[in-house]
Each structure stands twice: as structure tokens, then as C-alpha cells.
Image (spheres, grey):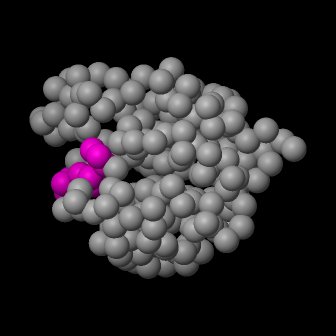
Amino acid sequence: MSDRLPGFFEGTEMPTTGWWDALWPDPAAVLRAVRFQRDIDAVDLCCGDGWFTLPMAKVARHVLAIDIDRQFLELARRRLTLAEVMNCDFVEGDAYGLDKLASQPVDFVLIANAFHGVPDRLRLAQAVHRTLKSGGRFAIVNWHQRPREETAILGEPRGPKTELRMSPAQTIQSVEAGELRFAELVELPPYHYGVVFERAPS
């Protein structure tokens, strides 16, 4: 739907109806695994239709949901409105401009199922670094570097092209170059991992 938008990251289109909830039946559990905490200020970067935005907002003090696609943002807004969760702002914008889109430093930035498509990962990591508070955390949920035909959901291969997938080591190297410190690697079965980074306390 949106892969022709300028700035849209390759291989990050939202899935067709049905398999997202088959893959992530409990998005709140994913957030717990990457150490998302209660009562914080957070950003859901490349938020898509808000699948992770809603459980983030249910426990956070405030969430900023950012996506370059207006249609995705509207879906996310509708998801939170139906759940009567109101502590979230929705901003249309380029992920590289994160530090300008966020009005103040935050405790946590999440990017799920999109980092593999980022052309300039150093630039994004630097933008996240500028956005985080001292001691703030950046979590990446990424597809494992497995052939696409091996990551079947509801009987069909799913996820980004094989050549776009990154190993945990590649993800860590990309982000550490932006002066964020590796903190933790967690497995997110069946096909993902999470990497958590920290902005060093000043």
C-alpha cells in the first residue's frame, strides 16, 4: 500500500489481515521481554497500525506513535480510540527526524519489524541517541536471519526478503556505531529476536 512513499523503509509493509495476530498474539509479552516499563515516556517508531502502540500506552505515562504513512497512523489512532486509551500522540514523519518530532527526551524507543529496511542505520541510531534521556533504552525487534521460506505463518512464507534480514551481531554493530551501548539480547519465538541498547548515563 505504502512502499512508494518517499522515505518508506523497504520490506516494512504491514501484513495482511490475520497473520499479525497469529505471529504476535501477546504483544504485551514482547514488550516485557525487551524490558519495557510502566509509567515512562516512550516512542513507537514506525508504529504501523498500532499493534505494539496500544499495549505500550496501556502501561506508559505517554507514548508518541510515529509513522511516515498517514493511513497506518489512522489505523493506530482508531485502535487506541476503540480501547479508550488516550495517552498517545500520533505524528506523521520520517524516522530519521525522530529527535525533531519528539518534543522532549524520552525513556524508551521501540522499533519493531522495521529496522531491517532502514538504509542508513547509523543515522537512525544517532537520531535515537539524541532523543533518549540519559540511561534511556532503545529496543529493536527484528526478524532472524533465516530464509523467508522458513518463516511460515498460517501456511505461507512471511516477513521481509531473505536478503534484508539481519543477524543480531549485525544489528548490534549498526547501533553501537551511533553511540548506544548494547545491553541485552532476547529471543522472541518463533522467528524474531530483540536487542536492547542504552544511552550511557551522563
The residue under the point 50% across, 65% down is 65
Q: Is residue 25 left or right of residue 182?
A: left
Q: Percent x, y for residue 147?
A: 23, 23
Examine the image and state in which quarter residue 146 appears: top left
Viewer-closest of 172 and 139: 172
Percent across and percent down for residue 183 are 68, 30
- Residue sticking out furthest to the left: 155
Q: Left or right: 183 with respect to 49?
A: right
**Residue at 27% in and 54% down:** 14
Residue lying at 53% horizontally and 31% vertically, measured from the top left: 174
Residue found 44% across the figure and 71% down from its top: 92
Residue 113 within the segment the image draws in magenta: no
Query: Total of numbered circles in the picture?
Result: 0
Apparent side of residue 59 relative to residue 40 in the rendered image (left or right): left
Q: Residue furthest right?
A: 202
Q: Is residue 57 visible?
A: no
Picture quarter with the N terminus: bottom left
* Magenta-colored span: 10-18
* Residue 14 inside the magenta-drawn segment: yes
Q: Which secondary structure type mostly characterizes the magenta part of the structure? A: loop
Foreground residue, 62 or 169?
169
Q: Is residue 106 above or below residue 128?
A: below
- In the image, 166 versus 24, the foreground residue is 166
**Rendered location of residue 192, percent (x, y):** 40, 32
Q: Is residue 134 visible?
A: yes
Is 121 in front, or is 53? 121
